[in-house]
Amino acid sequence: MHDMRTIAEDSRLLLKKAEKDGIETVWDRFEAQQPSCGYCEMGLSCRICVMGPCRIDPFGEGPQKGVCGADADIIVARNLCRMIAAGAASHSDHGRDLVEVLEAVSEGRAPGYSIRDEQKLKHLAIEYGIAIEGKQILKIAGELAYAMQEDFGTRKKELTFVKRAPAKRQEIWKKIGITPRGIDRETSEMMHRTHMGVDNGWLSLLLQGMRNALSDGWGGAMIASEVSDILYGTPMPVQTSANVGVLKADHVNIVVHGHNPVVSEMILLACQTTELVDLAKQKGAKGINLAGVCCTGNELLMRHGVAMAGNHLTTELVLATGAVEMMIVDYQCIMPAIASVAACYHTKMISTSDKAHFPGMVHREFHPDNAKVLAIELIKEAIENFECRGNVYIPTEPVASIGGCSVEAILKVLGGTPTPFIDAIKAGLIRGAVGIVGCNNPRIRQDYGHVTLTKRLIENDILVIDTGCVAVATAKAGLKMPESVKYAGAGLAKVCTQLGVPPVFHIGSCVDNVRILVLLSALANTLGVDISDLPVAGAAPEWYSEKAVAIGVYFVASGVYTVLGPMPPITGSMNVVNLLTQGLNDVVGATFAVEPDPEKAAVLIRRHIEGKRQKLGLDSMTI
Amino acid sequence: MKKVMVHPERCVGCMQCMMSCATAHSQSKSLFTAISEKPLPKPRVHVGAGRYGEGFPNRCRHCDPAPCLSACLPGAIFRDHATGTILINPERCINCASCAMACPFGVIRYHQEYSAPIGKAVAVKCDNCLERQIPACVEVCKSGALTYEEPSSAMKRKTDEVARSICADAMKENTTPGFALLNAVKRAEVRMREEKSCTI
């Protein structure tokens, strides 16, 4: 049974342990939910107003319109657009929190935080039109934070980072009127338009949905990624390891879970202080071991090589090791069930964000001014919890992996310009590149979609760049070491061996998907083409969240063909399905495809890449 | 005489029939107050999940002869001859579970009911909503998985459907492509999860 749930050995063994310990997991709850509601799965239920709730009968005999008169097309489009709005809001609010830390640093209100990448700060300040000559670093930081905060509002005609996109792409956005104007504005307008009696054109709703997603990709999330680099350093290649075996039986284990490095960076600092390490030793441990799960783990992994205990569906199982003294969470993707798992062991659960409270957790709120002190307090409590530990079961050995492949790091390896990569594509050694991103979802056997698709692509000479839960899955599967070229086709292996890099690049957390946009823009600009002309694609084989919807839509709206694993709730409207999978090609030069089987998804992607190669006048194959 | 018909291919698994049934068998007959009643009203129709997660509303067939009725030693189970409905007298029920064991469809449950003696768990099953014009489960079903109609008209409709399905032109016709698409994806997901050999 556990084999059906996951392909990851650590998960499989810990599922057995969890079963023995009587712990309910996400898979049990998924099964208890079957059958899931077909109206909801098809996007045909509407809870927007209280004349309803309404649903449309997909068989055509029952109601075909909601109380207000909205038909299936309108209801499906409104529901999808609200998912985009929620996803965009999540990344963008994450970005806002970082900008607030940047502001606090500039005002000297954030002890422990600093400007770690001054060059990037200056570079971004120039991009934002800030004069930096003769100004002190903190002054520039303050002015940049102010300028970025303006991007959130409604005072601009377009977001600053829109200019990073290739000129042809900007033209497309202008032509169809989806250039994002303000980060909060687009989400706010999306919510307005989907209110009863506002926008009832399913096409115009979806266009605003794309603008809203672009305000995330080229706005909120991009700010989140860039400001994280300023505050915590731009990632450079770093050795790390992954799977639940990164926990150490003889150490105090602390796991960070969530997304925003604002908390996890301070936790890391605290774990490194000599007094606390000494205290851990006094208590009989060999030291303090910090590990991550989810994207805040990716943030620490990218910048400091902090080991990764697991991805989304492993978050509960990590606790079933009985080896975790404390789990510290911030926000997003933290299952509210998780504290009830911790309750079976000695693990202390701490929530830290004023925005995110969880049942069964102790709430200790982090703010820029108290973060350093609070982090030390918490680690002290975690160390004291070490002696309460019961039996420990850490079933696997960690797998070595390389992280830290920021755009800056990739360009550095290539000698400062994307040209060597472009030459390898032109020569056909590398057929193209694919960004595989997104979550885990109990609908798909954990990591099966990610690992299978990645393997099929690299063995066919397609470079894979991944983020989020995918990045953790492929690290666990051993695909992220220079030796992993043994899984790659001859051409890709040759290029990777020459450069000394793995065939799969870990480019970061989920907000770091914007690094893919930056990279694609650099490639397109070097070639003088649009992103949609490049032999590239996106995939989200195991996606589950609203954030993933926003990401998928900003990929497609930026010209990247994107293959989803699970079906989004849109099948109630074949108009919406046809637009997203075919019609959008004429609008933004890219479409979605849905294919849960990664073997078939790989074929779709290879076919797409060869098609783009042919259009660019490069050699191409028939797939 | 009208009967409740089940059309499993139309069930979208929303479970509204269950909620509506529990409400119809509550004291207050209102969802919002029913949820705070003691004992908590429970549904008599249950939606199960098929191999691919497809819904199926499982409901008493009111069999004739009824195995539950034959198995009931205290004579608590009886047939309402006017409607053919199999009913249970909670006063007589001794909670022995013989009827549940005899039932081939697993539609008899045991719990307290406001209409039964206080504190006593009794056998409970579908009563065809005899107090209502239309059974609650049918009334709430918007996808047509449950209908309340004359068997003759349902049979005629089915006959016509079969007749149409053998017509060459109709073979291509798919009136609900979206539902078929969703189901295709769900089937693929389940098959992938169940795949024995992991080829990666």
Image (cartoon, rainbow, N blue to C red):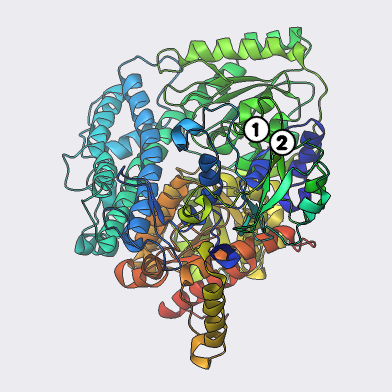
Q: Amino acid at mark 2?
A: Val
- Which chain letter matches label 2? B
A315 or A404, which lies in front? A315
User: For the point 67% across and 56% down, which residue is it?
Assistant: A448
Q: Dividing the picture into quarters, in which one does residue B199 lie? A: bottom right
x and y, in percent, of residue A77 in the image: 34, 57
Image position of A513 (left or right of A202) = right
Label 1 and label 2: CA atoms lie apart by 7 Å
x and y, in percent, of residue A242 in the image: 69, 40
Image position of A302 (left or right of A556) = right
Q: Amino acid at mark 1?
A: Ala
x and y, in percent, of residue A257 in the image: 57, 31
SS under mark 2 = strand
Q: Which residue matches tag 1?
A: B116
A547 or A560, which lies in front? A547
Q: Dividing the picture into quarters, in which one does residue A597 lie? A: bottom right
Same chain check for tags 1 and 2:
yes
Q: Which residue matches tag 2?
A: B122
- Which chain letter matches label 1? B
SS under mark 1 = loop
Image position of A359 (left or right of A615) = right
Mark positioned earlier in the residue sequence (1 or 2): 1
Q: Looking at the image, is A341 positioned above or below residue B182?
A: above
Q: Is residue A358 something one can see in this rendering?
A: yes
